[in-house]
Image (cartoon, helix red, strand yellow):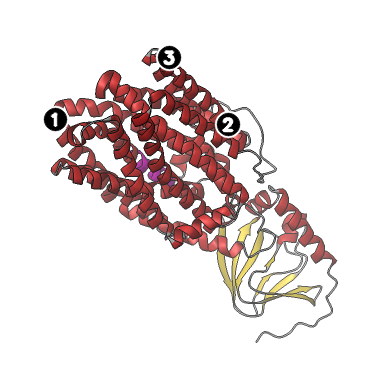
Amino acid sequence: MGAAGSALRTVAANRDLRRAQLSFAFGLTAEWVLTVALGVVAFRAGGTTAVGAVAFLRMVPAAILLPWATALADHFPRDRVLRWACCLRAVAIGGAASVLAFDGPVVAVYALAVAQTVTFAIYRPAHSALLPALCRTPLELTSAYVARGLIDAGSTFVGPVIAAVLLGVSNAASTFTVAAALSLGAAWFLGGLSYEAPTTARLARPRASDLVAGFRALTTYRDAGLLVLLGAVQTFTRGCLNVLMLVVAIELLGGSDADVGALTAVIGAGAVVGSLAVSMLRSGRRLAVLLGAGVALWGLPLVAVGAFPRPLVVVSAMAVIGVGNALVDVGLFTLPARLVPDALLARCFGALESVISVAVAVGSLVTPLVIAGIGSRWTRVGVGSVGALALAVSSRRLGRIDQQVTVRTDAINALQRIAMLRPLPMPAIEILAANSDQSTVPAGGQVFAQGEHGDRFYAIEHGDAVVMRDGRRSRALGPGDCFGEIALLRDVPRTATVIARTDLQLRSIDREHFLNTVNGYASSASSASTLVSDRLADDDTTQPLAPPP
């Protein structure tokens, strides 16, 4: 609880993160309220076949349109794209509520449900791509996704509870109306966000190539691609569970409308517990392995329900699935944000959501057919085995991903000691860290000489150095200091010589990545310009060089 509170306090201290997370809370709660209510409407109208068909029809159009839609979030301000998505979604849900209130055709409700899914499909990937731009450190970024996982888990609990209560005391129309109001609340919280986008970002219309850019990124950045594949395994299981949940509620719990919402809420309760556990690991150093474990936990409880079909086992299994959901969510959204460049991030998350949508749709569609063939009990056993198999196949590579992220986090921590780089948002500092190299220079050694061509920027991690200009000492440097930026920013030869006074451990960045990143953000460009001006104006060159110890 203390770790979870610390993550939430980290987020709450950042105004923009706080508003973005509140928007997510309202938006996801609306999603669960709607999902439960729509499932009940479909089941009462056409049984499990209708539930599976509606889930399929909701997901497939969203999956097809999502790659193009998320390109908007890479070309236009992401907060604005999110607001429009929430407002359009509220209109569609409100229309469905009106159809239900006036006993209109259920097909119209389905059509509006598909429309709201399409408009809202962009929300999670655009929100996932927005969060890194609101963060400054890896801890803040991981805390943001941990907090969002807690919010997601809470929404998974609160949304079905709201739906269960409304369906128990009122009807589906009022439940849809509440979902529409929550969606409008999500739009309101996104107003007034203030964050720095790259000055080189272009506001251009999405192009045909954007349709595949996210998928291409997942093949280029293969570690992110593996995580998305595991996410697809988990969401296929989730699609199967959409149907199995109703079957289990009918066969083992009585089958009332409220039972469906209550059983879904148990998953949310488990997700809250899982999110609290994940919050203790917000350093982000084991998220890939936890993601794999979460995928397995989505399936193994279904095996238990198939083997021991008892009410207590069902409830316990749903809680464990909720724990698995929390483990998957934090890793599935935190890690791609660190493995894929920001310019592609929304489209990458869009590809993720497309894969998820297809996986949910396929799972929802095939489950009624499998149940008809082998029965619900063996269907649960078969579906539940898939996640464990996926973990067994991918466990080694997940460990390597965690190791890579740990090394990069250490590099970020070193670079953020540099005042010039401190204003950069996480996506920018991540690029620098990913393209940095470590080197050592022994005491008395020369890093570079005055007049040489400059092609790298240096930051001192450990040790001390002295700067010599025209044969005289200019200044001393220590851990957290940087040098070499003048030749890169002004495109001139090295203006001084740098000599190690003690053994130096350096982290360096090549010219291209340094200039593109530092000049790409107004705050860091201004800080760099001030630093260069101050150093060139420094006339303290009269001190003799002290001998190295």
Q: Residues within 10 Å of mark 2 (few under 14, many from 20)?
A: many
Residue 11 against residue 466 in the figure, above or below: above
Q: Quadrant of the N terminus?
A: bottom left
Instruction: Please give the label number shown on residue 194.
Output: none
Q: Quadrant of the C terminus?
A: bottom right
Q: Nearer the viewer, residue 171 or 210?
A: 171
Residue 320 against residue 416 in the figure, above or below: above
Q: Give SS at disc 1.
A: helix
Magenta range is 222-232
Residue that mark 1 sits on:
374
Which one is earlier in the sequence, the residue at label 1 or at label 3?
A: 3
Measured in 3D between alpha carbons, the distance from the residue under mark 1 to the one under mark 3, in whole angstroms, is 40 Å
Say which amino acid is labelled 3: Phe
**Splitting the image into 4 quarters, where does residue 36 fall?**
top left
Q: Is residue 522 rendered to the left or right of residue 161?
A: right
Q: Is residue 264 rendered to the left or right of residue 205?
A: left
Residue 372 against residue 404 in the figure, above or below: above
Residue that mark 3 sits on:
102
Asked whether the viewer can see residue 210, the reply is no
Q: Disc 3 vs disc 2: Cβ atoms closer than 8 Å?
A: no
Q: Is residue 530 rendered to the left or right of residue 272?
A: right
Q: Nearer the viewer, residue 256 or 11?
A: 256
Say which amino acid is labelled 2: Leu
